[in-house]
Amino acid sequence: MRAFLQDKFGTSSIAHVDDVELKNILEGKPLLMRTKYRKAVANGGGKPLIKKDETYRKEHLMASSFEKSQRNIKYGFKCLFMSVSEACGELKVTVLNQSKKAGVVGCRTLNDTASSPEDYGHKDDQITFTDGQESADFFVSIVNDDSFEPDEDFLIELYDPNSKKKLEGRDTQVRITILDDDKPGKIVFENPRTR
């Protein structure tokens, strides 16, 4: 504790430390960052409070809200923005076969503020559709850690298996927000009157 006080406040005595400043360093800024982030990415309101190990999954933006001319003519995701809790374990996204014809499309995860393998399991697979098949599911594992951190995003995109280039269209990339369900630690003193 003395090393921490010396590093952060330039003193090893708790008597010379401002209580408010100590609280801000221990728990305030990360909590404020998370709240600010949730408000910034919220679609139509604030994000819910997630209890530790609570399973949560919500779709926020559907591809059907875009004009056909903005979507890929062959393949696309059903949902383009989704949030999940760390405790969900595995995430399922639906890939649509717009033409309902036989074909192959690549599907891969990409780091954004979330990174693999710390926050989710990287995946790069090809999905094979049969003639008449309308959709297929793509699964990604979500890591449930005990670290307090801001909510983080990663992307899943569709690509051409031959060229490895992302497919054109607004519906060929989905943003996943992993909602952190951990609380910051607290330092308490046996006798709060001691300085």
Image (cartoon, rainbow, N blue to C red):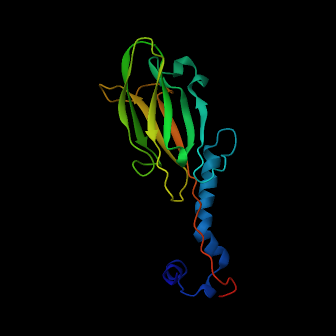
- Which is more toward the observer, 82 or 72? 82
Residue sitting at 47 percent across and 32 percent down?
A: 173
The x, y position of residue 135, in whole percent, is 48, 21
The x, y position of residue 10, in whole percent, is 53, 83
**Where 33 sits versus 75, above or below?**
below
Q: Is residue 13 left or right of residue 108?
A: right
Q: On the image, which quarter does residue 42 sit in? A: top right
Q: Is residue 47 left or right of residue 171?
A: right
Q: On the image, which quarter does residue 106 sit in? A: top left
If the image is split into quadrants, where does the C terminus sit? bottom right
The x, y position of residue 127, in whole percent, is 38, 25
Q: On the image, which quarter does residue 74 sit in? A: top left
Residue sitting at 53 percent across and 57 percent down?
A: 149
- Look at the image and tell me whether residue 178 can be seen: no
- Which is more toward the observer, 141 or 151? 141
- Which is more toward the observer, 77 or 72? 77
**Where 156 sits versus 153, above or below?**
above
**Where 97 sits versus 55, above or below?**
above
**Where 180 sits versus 138, above or below?**
below
Q: Is residue 25 left or right of residue 135?
A: right
The x, y position of residue 56, in whole percent, is 60, 43
- Look at the image and tell me whether residue 24 can be seen: yes
